[in-house]
Image (spheres, grey):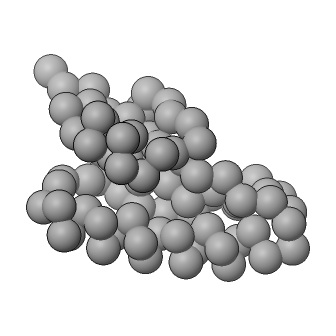
Amino acid sequence: MNRKIKLLWDFRGEDASKTAKHHTQHLREFAQVEVLNFYKIDVENKNAMFSSAVITIDEIDLKIYKDKLKPHRGELV
């Protein structure tokens, strides 16, 4: 059974939510260009000054995403 991984890119400041939302567009484009599967791309707003762009992927694709996009952190789903 393949595990799911959630990769996160963190943004801070007054425009954190807007920046995270914009970053999700790039995540979607990358997945389409590289023909990679993903489960979900979304924004997680922690508070008014801290948001994260998130993509949930299969563990098998982790190396490609990690090496090319350099996420700030990752979590098992």
Task: Identify whether 69 is placed above or below 72.
Answer: below
Give left or right: position of 3 versus 14.
left
* Residue at 22%, 39% in the rendered image: 61
State the residue lying farthest toward the front: 68
Residue 41 visible, this angle: yes
* Residue at 61%, 68% in the rendered image: 20
Give left or right: position of 31 versus 19.
left
Q: x, y (%) of residue 50?
A: 79, 58
Residue 58 visible, this angle: no
The N terminus - image quarter: top left
State the residue lying farthest toward the top: 1
Q: x, y (%) of residue 15?
A: 79, 76
Q: x, y (%) of residue 74?
A: 50, 34
Task: Identify whether 46 is placed above or below 59.
Answer: below
Give left or right: position of 53 versus 27.
right
Q: x, y (%) of residue 51?
A: 71, 59
* Residue at 47%, 69% in the rendered image: 24
Give left or right: position of 48 versus 36.
right
Task: State which quadrant residue 60 falls in.
Answer: top left
* Residue at 20%, 69% in the rendered image: 32
Q: How many marks?
A: 0
The C terminus - image quarter: top left
